[in-house]
Amino acid sequence: MKSRYGSYTGSSNLVIRPEIASANVNVISTLLNARSNPSKLAGLLGSGFLFKLMLGTVGIKDFETHMSNVLNMKCGVVLLKYPEFFFSLENVDDIKLAEKYKNFSP
């Protein structure tokens, strides 16, 4: 995500209290399933918001507020400088790759 404040990348890491996850299974499932489908994502987040994201006019606080409103739960962004957090495990090949490099030390 490019914004007027810098460039950021997302990851598939979620930190969520179990009771919040249980109470919001449907909306969380919908969001996770929409990640790789732009039309579903636009329907969930709103095409206007996605347009602002593409233009780079959405700040971090704006993003947090919008996601909190859409998901009806408090959402926050955590800024990290560690690339390990940007590695997503979404399929068997990802897991094999992670296992290959899990003991890697530069």
Image: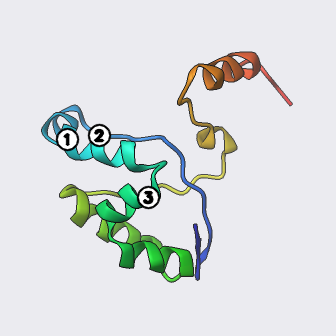
Q: Quadrant of residue 7?
A: bottom right
Determine the residue positioned at 37% across, 65% down: 42
Q: Are marks 2 and 1 in contact (CB under 8 Å)?
A: yes
Q: Secondary structure at mark 1?
A: helix
Amino acid type, residue under disc 2 in the picture: Ser
Q: Is residue 54 left or right of residue 67?
A: right
| Residue marked by disc 3 | 77
Distance between mark 2 and mark 1 Cα atoms: 5 Å
Determine the residue positioned at 49% across, 42% down: 12
User: First in sequence: mark 3 or mark 2?
Assistant: 2
Q: Are marks 1 and 3 in contact (CB under 8 Å)?
A: no
| Residue 56 visible within the image | no
Determine the residue positioned at 54% across, 46% down: 11
Q: Is residue 41 left or right of residue 70?
A: right
The quadrant of the picture occupied by the C terminus is top right
Q: Tell me residue 22's x, y (percent).
A: 17, 33
Dot 3 alpha-carbon crowd within 10 angstroms: few under 14, some 14 to 19, many 20 or more: few
Dot 2 alpha-carbon crowd within 10 angstroms: few under 14, some 14 to 19, many 20 or more: few
Q: Tell me residue 43's x, y (percent).
A: 31, 63
40 over 59 or under it: above or below: above
Amino acid type, residue under disc 3 in the picture: Val
Total count of labels: 3
Q: Quadrant of residue 8?
A: bottom right
| Residue marked by disc 1 | 26
Distance between mark 3 and mark 2 Cα atoms: 19 Å
In this view, the mark in front (3 or 2):
2
| Residue marked by disc 2 | 29
Determine the residue positioned at 44% across, 49% down: 35
* Nearer-the-camera pick, 69 or 6: 69
The quadrant of the picture occupied by the N terminus is bottom right
* Nearer-the-camera pick, 45 or 21: 45
